[in-house]
Amino acid sequence: LKSKIDFFVCSFSGGKDSQVILDLVTRVIPPKDLVVIYSDTGYELPSSLELYQDVQDYYHSIYPDLRFHISKNKQPLMYYWDKMGAPSRVLRWCCSIMKSAPLAVLLKELNGGQKQPSAILFDGVRAEESFNRAGRSRIGKNAKHNNIINISPILEWNATETYLYIMLHRLPFNKAYRIGFSRVGCVICPYSSKWSENIASKVYPKSISPFVEAIKTSLEEANISGIDNYIKLGKWKERAGGRTVKCESSLTIIEEGADFRAILTSPREDIFQWFNILGDIKSESTTKKTIGTLNYKRNLYPYIIEHLGDNTISIEVKGTNNDVIILSHLKKVLYKSTYCIHCEVCEVECPTGALKVSPYVSVDTSKCVHCLKCIDFDGKGCMSASSVNISTGDNKTKMQSTKSGINRYNDGMGLREAWLKKYFSTSETFFNDDSHGLNPRYQIPPFVNWIREAYILNHEDKTISEIGKLLCEHYENEPNAIWEIIFINLTENSEVT
């Protein structure tokens, strides 16, 4: 209470762990200082929705002043499935868009709607549940969103202890556990087991049917064979590409050298709104062309934006000089302009309240401090862009490619150290003959994709880039440092890293 915390929040999901957390927290935090938020993601089991009402009645009988709220995305869940495709283990957009962001948006509204409040959020995360959660800290600052401190009081508890606590205190209990569910999260999930899916299909067929049908439809439209078996084996959970997602918009990066050039086709948002977050802009416009300067980190960059017709825009930013930082941020704002679907995940990252994305994007330049948190939270700066798998190809390739996801690397062909050593030692002649020893059909294509996405190759051809020359120069003496740079570049630029 003395640390400028605006809200103490208990996140309730209907599961056994959140039930224990709610009971523990209400015994410590005064009801007037606590907010209980139930996240209605649209995936909820019917038994969880029933339990939420029982929980309200139970705790209001003990703490009449305890506040309960429901957070929910402004769009129905299937809207995002249509725009972004089904979530997967690689492209797990659902938690951020349907749970975390709506909760943060609700807190902002409860705080008057000006900016994100500071909050302590108690959750039911337990280390026993997964490898990733085992590495979590009991206290996590800015773990998911700015200004929210996540606290996991039962991180070290096991499942038996949570069940015993519920029975000891005779707390409301989710009926789904009694019919065989080990976890009662979403009715369908990329991380669910076959056991849970089988129970859900038998007990809640109406709840799970829309999602299964959506997966089938997308597979049919993408001409995937053996659809029933594909779904039965859970292959949809492995989606790392966008070939099953319809998307009219596209972004093509043409050049990333001394000058930056790109083409936007059917962009969904005003490019100038997103440009505002990079720095102050000045411009002069005619009917089809805008010429101006961008003040990015105290450096002026001339730019030209031209309307080419058919809802196509070209942009050129001069003087980027292979600076990977500004190139990264330029691409991210273009991803935003091209693919934004107003999911609000980026809005809750804004610490000053300058950014609004619903019903359309607007940036209050008097509030924006150019912190870039609204684009740096995601590898491509936009969850929608990441989910439709934009591939940075050459100027003949649209960003949404049929050879996308892990298919770009021949179903998982990695970047081999021996290949890279050979390339660095013969970079000028490597692709001119077969002396490298790589199979031209199965090994060369994934290798080209890897080193192109590591910024070692120029995107318009197979010539070594300026960054590649630097890495080549220092590889023999500092191989570990070079690999670190490569992995950083891949994390930024490859859809599967």
Image: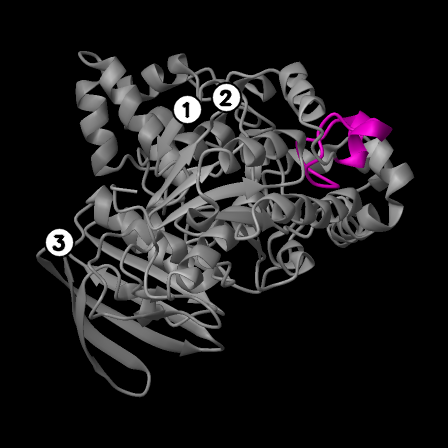
- Tell me the amino acid under the disc marked 2: Leu
**Identity of the residue furthest to the bottom in this view:** 287
Q: Closer to the camera: disc 2 or disc 3?
A: 2
| Disc number for residue 297 | 3
Magenta segment, principal secondary structure?
loop
Tags 2 and 1 touching, CB below 8 Å? yes
Q: Quadrant of the C terminus?
A: top left
**Identity of the residue furthest to the left in this view:** 298
N-term mark: 2 or 3: 2
Residue 481, image x, y percentages = 23, 19
| Disc 2 to disc 1, C-alpha distance | 6 Å
- Tell me the amino acid under the disc marked 1: Arg
Which residue, given by chain and number where applicable, does mark 2 sit on?
155
Which residue, given by chain and number where applicable, does mark 1 sit on?
138
Q: Nearer the viewer, residue 379 or 99?
A: 99
| Disc 2 to disc 3, C-alpha distance | 41 Å
